[in-house]
Structure formats: C-alpha cells, structure tokens
Image (cartoon, rainbow, N blue to C red):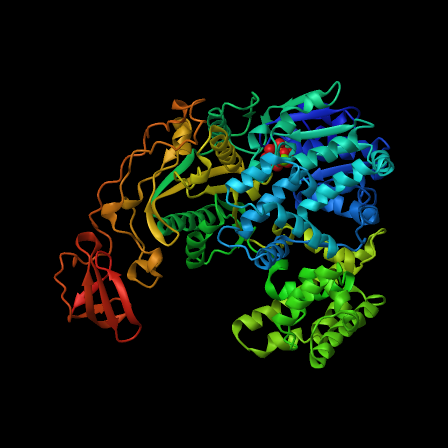
Amino acid sequence: MEKYLSQLNDAQLEPTIQINGPMIVIAGAGSGKTRVLTYRIAYMMSKGIDPFNILSLTFTNKAAREMKERISQIVGASEAKNLWMGTFHSVFAKILRIEADKLGYPSNFTIYDTQDSDRLIRDIIKEMNLDKDIYKYKQIRSRISSYKNSLITVRAYFQNQELIEADTMARRPRMGDIYKEYVERCFKAGAMDFDDLLLKTNELLTRFPDVLAKYQNRFKYILVDEYQDTNHSQYLIVRALSDKFQNICVVGDDAQSIYAFRGANINNILNFQKDYDDVKVFRLEQNYRSTKNIVNAANSIIDKNQTKLEKVVWTANDDGPKIKVNRSLTDADEGRYVASTIFDNKMNYQLNNSDFAILYRTNAQSRSIEDALRKRDIPYRIYGGLSFYQRKEIKDVLSYLRLIINPADEEALKRVINFPPRGIGQTTVDRLIVAANGYKRSIFEVMKNIDKTDIKVNSGIKNKLQNFVTLIESYQVLNQTADVFELAEHVTRTSGLIKEFNKDGTPEGVTRMENIEELLNGMKDFVEGQKELADATGSLAEFLEDVALATDLDNEKEDADQVALMTIHLAKGLEFPYVFIVGLEEDLFPSAMSMNTRSELEEERRLFYVALTRAEKQAYLTYALSRYRWGKLVDSEPSRFIEEIDEQYLDIVTPIEERRFNPMLDADIFGDAPEQTRRPDQSQVRYKPAKQPVFKKGKAKTEPEKYQPSKPKNLKPVAQANGSGQQTVNLSDSKLVVGNTVKHIRFGTGEVLKIEGAGADTKAEIKFQHGGVKKLLLRFAKLEVV
Ligand code: ATP
Ligand code: MG
C-alpha cells in the first residue's frame, strides 16, 4: 500500500480508495473530510487516472491551493498542475470563457464584482426615477441574486405570478423591470456578475448537448467539498456534469450548513442518495482537530437541532482545558479581555499570533477588538473586509485595464471616463448612456461614432471624448506586445492616475500610491509565476479573472504572523489552536434577524457549531452586558448558545467587575477614547430574563413552546457596581464643583466646566491646559482638587 495512505484511519481509507460510482461522506467537523478528498485525488492519480479528467470543487480558492500543494507533495508538482481545482465560480468562469460565444458573450467578458453590480443597480433605479428608500439597491441586488441562483430568468420571472405579487406586496412593483434592465445592461456591457457564472453555465449545459457531452467526458471524476452549502444552481451543474459517468464524490456535514441566507440548500446533501443510483455512504466519526472538551461541547450544542442527520463525533485527543466563558461589562471590556488573554498566552506558552483567531457574527464587531489589540501591540489581520482589489485606487487602475480587454464594460468606463478629470461632465455621460441604450450599443461604441449619432455635444467635448477613445485604443495596441506588469505601469503613468494620487500629498494619497505599487508588485509576481505554467499565457485577461474571483482569504500573506479576525461564515473549513468567539449575546448571536422561525434559529446554531469546532486546543466564549450598536448603548443578555452547552465542559471565568483594571492598558477610562467606547453607567448593567422570541405569523402553530430559551443556569446576574477599589479617587459624591481646578495623573491641570449625571455615572467636563476638553467618568478618573 502507498505510504501516504497510512496517514488515514480505516474509516477514512475506505472512501479514499473507492474511485468509481457515486458516494457521499457525511461526517462531523474535523473528522478528515477534506483530507479524504485530498488523498483520494492523489490516490486516483497514482492509479493512472489523468488529472485532466478530475474536477475538484472547493469552497475557497485558498482551500484549492492547499489541496493542490498537498497533492503535489504526494504525486509530484508537474502532475498536480493539470488538475481542475477551485471554487465553482473560478472553474466555471474558465469554461465560460471557452464557450462564451455560444451564449452571445465575448470570450473576454468582464466579471462584475458586487461593487459594480451595486453601482449599476443604483444607476438603474435613478434612471427609472424610483424612490431609492423603497428600492434599496442592496435588497434589489440580493433579490436578483436569489432569482439567478434559483434559475429564475427574467422571462421566468414575468411568467411567475407569485413572484410578481410578492414583490408588489413588498412595495416594489417595478422589481421585474429593474431585473430586466440590469440583465440587459450587463449583457450589453459584455459582463457577467458572480451569479451569472453559475446561471450561464447551467444555460450552456442545458441548451447545448454537445457542450454538455464534452465536459461530461472531460470531467469523468468529480469531487465536491462542503457540499452542504451548494445552492440550487451549483447543484444542477454538478448533477449535469456527473450524469454520464456518475463518478461523483461529495463530502459535507449537514450540521455545518450556514449559507441558507445566500441560497444554499441543505436538501442537496440530504437528498443526495435519491439523486444517484447505488450511492455509497461513508461516515467518519473520529475528530482529529480538537480536544475532548471542545468536541463534546460542540456535540451538546448541535444536539439541540431537530433537523439533522444523526452522527457520532468523538476524539482520542486530550481532554484539554474547559471552554472559558467570559462576561464583560461592555464591548470595549470584551476587547480588552481578548487582547490580554492573547498576550498572556503568548507570553506563557511561546505562541505565535497566528495561533489565535477571533470569530464574530458580524463584521461591525471587529472595531472594539481591534482597538484593544492595537493597544497591546498585537498584530492582526481582518479577513473579509473590503478586499485589496476593491479599494478605490486599485479599482481605478483595474478599470482602465478592463476597458482594454473589453471596451463595452460600462461600469469600468463610467469609473474612469472622467478620472483623472478630463473635462467630461456627468451630463455628457448621462447623454451617452441614454444614447447607448437607444442604439443598443456600448457607450464606447457610441463615443467612437459620435459623429454618426444625434447626441448634442459641442466640439470641445467631442474632442475630449475622442481623446479618451484614442487613449484606450493605444493601450489596446500595447497590450498585444507588453505583459500585464508593463502595461499597467504604462497605464498608471500615461492616464494621469499616478499624478492625480501624488498631487494631494495627504497621508491617504501616500497610502494610495503604496497600494498601486503593491498592485504592480502583484502583477510582476503574476507574470513571473505564469511563466512556469504550461497552459497559462500571463495575459491581462487571465490576471483580471484571477482578481475578479479573488476572495479576501486569497490575498493573504501566508508568512505574516498575525491574529486572524473574521466572521464565522468565512472561517468554515479552517482551524486554529486558540479560538475566541465573541459577542455571544441574544439578538447578536443568534442574530435578531434569525429568530423568527425554527429553521433560522437552527441555522444560527449550526453557525455556532462551526465556530466552536474551528478550535484545536482551547475555545473562549465571550459576551458583554452592554454594547454600542448603531451608535447606541444597548443592554444585552448572554446568548442562549452558552446555556445550551453542557455545563461540565465550561469554565466560567471570574466576572469582569471583579477584575482589576490596568491603568496603562485601560487608558480609555481616563477619557481619551471616543465617547462610544467608554464604560456605561453600571447601574444599567444587569441581567434580564430572556425575552420571548418573536414568531412569524402562521409559523408559531408548528413549534411554539420549543423555542423558549432555556433559563440561565450559572450565569449569575452582575452585582450592582459600586466602583469599588480600582484606581478611583472617590469623587463621585460630587465634592467636585464647576470652577474647581483639578490635577489629573496624565492630563495635568485643568478647570471643571460642567458636571453631569449622578452616582456611579457622574461625569465631569474638564478643560485641561494641555490636551483640551475631556469628559471623564469620576468613578475612574484620578483627579485631585488643587
Ligand atoms: P471541517 O468539517 O471543519 O471541514 P474536515 O472534516 O474537513 O473538517 P479536515 O480539515 O480534513 O476535517 O481534518 C481536520 C484536522 O485533522 C486536519 O488538521 C487534518 O490534517 C487532521 N487529520 C485528519 N485525519 C487525520 C488522521 N487520520 N491522522 C492525523 N490527522 C488527521
Ligand atoms: Mg473540511
């Protein structure tokens, strides 16, 4: 037997060496599903299967890269290179390029990212004179996305009375018209959005049997990771491609299905056995990732879900420490707790920053954590924010490049036609758009043939338009000989972009320049890298495709030693030795928007299961009793998920109010942090009994009482704060009066301007001689009347 196979247990080995026929591996987190897929591919190749015939679909490009690397180690890099491996979007974008003309698209079609889609939708709403408060572009985008992922084309939409009624009921009777306009505009611009990459692939495979046959024969073996999160559109593609040979292997965990809100359909995994004949089902039970405490705690959580496949997960790993639960007063305290725990662990156990991950439900939560990490000088990196390629200056450069490849690209054109400013005003652009729509041509074509159109613009403007056309055309000529790097370098210089960003001299301007430099570096890298690949050309089109499909997880600098911050959704499939799950509060996690039905709540619970099972050695659960949300301080109660964990696996940390504050680290209690990060009035901070969850009408009948959150067990109410101990000088009984001169340990001497609030919440506004006016909580402020 091949040596690498000995790195699998018996249960893993079985599906690994079973090459033919339909099969599914259903297993809990950390049990080696991804490992099975990886080794299975290596095994297939060692049995002589041509890598060209293997298609492997992963959830992120990063996962694909890692798999390929591992396979290269086993079978050799030159063989592994030929595997088709990547996300659905990246694999099918490549296929669509080859087949684009069949669908009436140019092979150099542009891929619109979410920003492009949003801008286009906003423009359409404006052009149609619709109320943008009713027609919210983000909601419209997500509607369009869900139609596309359910394969509801514009035509199908207008034939579907139910959909039309639903949108009319939602006060958006023009939804269908927007959808139609959006689709037409994308088509005219030679652009596909992310959902089109799947929708058009489906169209291709259904409308052209010969094309379907070609790819069925090509992809004789198909493997899919994270199958539980495939949507309908992806499901149909896999179904169609595997129909002939039925050599399909999917792995997944129904308990980790967390993308229903984006159209993922858990039934794909539940129904797999009905979709194919003689499906072999494999189960893995041994978890290799986590300690016993983590595995058992995760089991006790997912047990609460009713909709699930019964599974066993156990581990032979150590018990490990119990899961730490920490209560903080505020989100700022929570941040401090996380930062100081990381700091202590690093010191005590010689750990790297990259051993830690901080996971949250919503991106907004990162702010308070970041503040605390910065104070401790702990390097961190946020994943899933604005990706590098979506920054303004980068998109500006890329828009020029996109126009070179596809001058019809409307969003790119609108972005740079007058940037840097060249005297082409919005009125002119609006006229061009109207004309382009009228002539059913691209804006660029209309500009090129401006004399043959009836657009009324003066000769000065005509010249400017002509110059822009000439500029882009000159780039197109250069593109025939120069590589991506040389071209981009030339473009940034001659378009005036560099000059524009250089000229303001502000720190932002400098950052923009650095980013552009980074982009150019990346291009150089790309050009060099592509030289090694047999089938790659290093072309601009290829570069732009990589960029369009890059997720933030992909731009990662692998060598950087940083704490990882990301949403739980993004953390799927990953693992870290130490994991903090923060903001475990009712209405935040589970999210207030996901508590209307049992199925929504169960999805939140699965999300929690995913979060907890990312941890290898130790998990920390934290919550704050009050938190700034939407600019307001709101009271919160501990998440029901904490209470749902079997108590024996938990270690409830000393309540925060008994912790001592370190004046050096908790500097903001002295008033130098923005108002909203400050400690709240502690008298408000107390535990409230869990609210009755809300039900949608009609759903309540089915399962009402089961939704009752369990009563808190060991999460005791916080004692009323008394400001005891700590570095307070007891001035809260208002010995201080307006006009007093005071001395502060750090700010020096100042005059009291105003006193407000009472008791523990008494604040004073003090004008310091150096450092300006500050509002201080007297309970904490170290003041001395002089
Ligand atoms: P998830 O559900 O989170 O995606 P998974 O089922 O895909 O998890 P893997 O990521 O493949 O699990 O494996 C979890 C960890 O356990 C990895 O670090 C992997 O290398 C390790 N592992 C899996 N199987 C074995 C084994 N037989 N021996 C040693 N380590 C293993
Ligand atoms: Mg996995």
**Depicted 444 relative to depicted 192: above or below:** below
Kindly indicate the quadrant of the structure image that contains residue 411: bottom right
Find the residue positioned furthest to the top: 278
Horizontal side of residue 483 vs 317, given as left or right? right
Q: Is residue 73 in view?
A: no
Q: Position of residue 321 (x, y in %)?
A: 44, 34
* Residue in view at x 53 percent, y 35 percent: 610
Residue in the image at 31% along x and 72% along y: 771
Residue 320 on image: x %, y %:
47, 33
Q: Which x, y percent locates residue 680?
A: 28, 52
Q: Quadrant of residue 328?
A: top left
- For the N terminus, the image quarter is top right
Relative to 616, residue 370 above or below: below
Pick out the residue farthest to the bottom: 460
Q: Is 491 on the left or on the right of 611, as rendered?
A: right
Query: Seen in the image, is 119 located left or right of residue 413?
Result: left
Judging depth in this view, the residue of 388 and 290 nearest the camera is 388
Q: Is residue 24 visible?
A: yes
Number of callouts: 0
Q: Ligand 1 falls in which quarter?
A: top right
- Residue 685: percent from left, percent from top: 27, 44
- The residue nearer to you, when weighing 113 against 451, is 451
Compared with residue 131, is residue 61 higher up or lower down, i.e. above or below?
Answer: above
Quadrant where the C terminus sits is bottom left
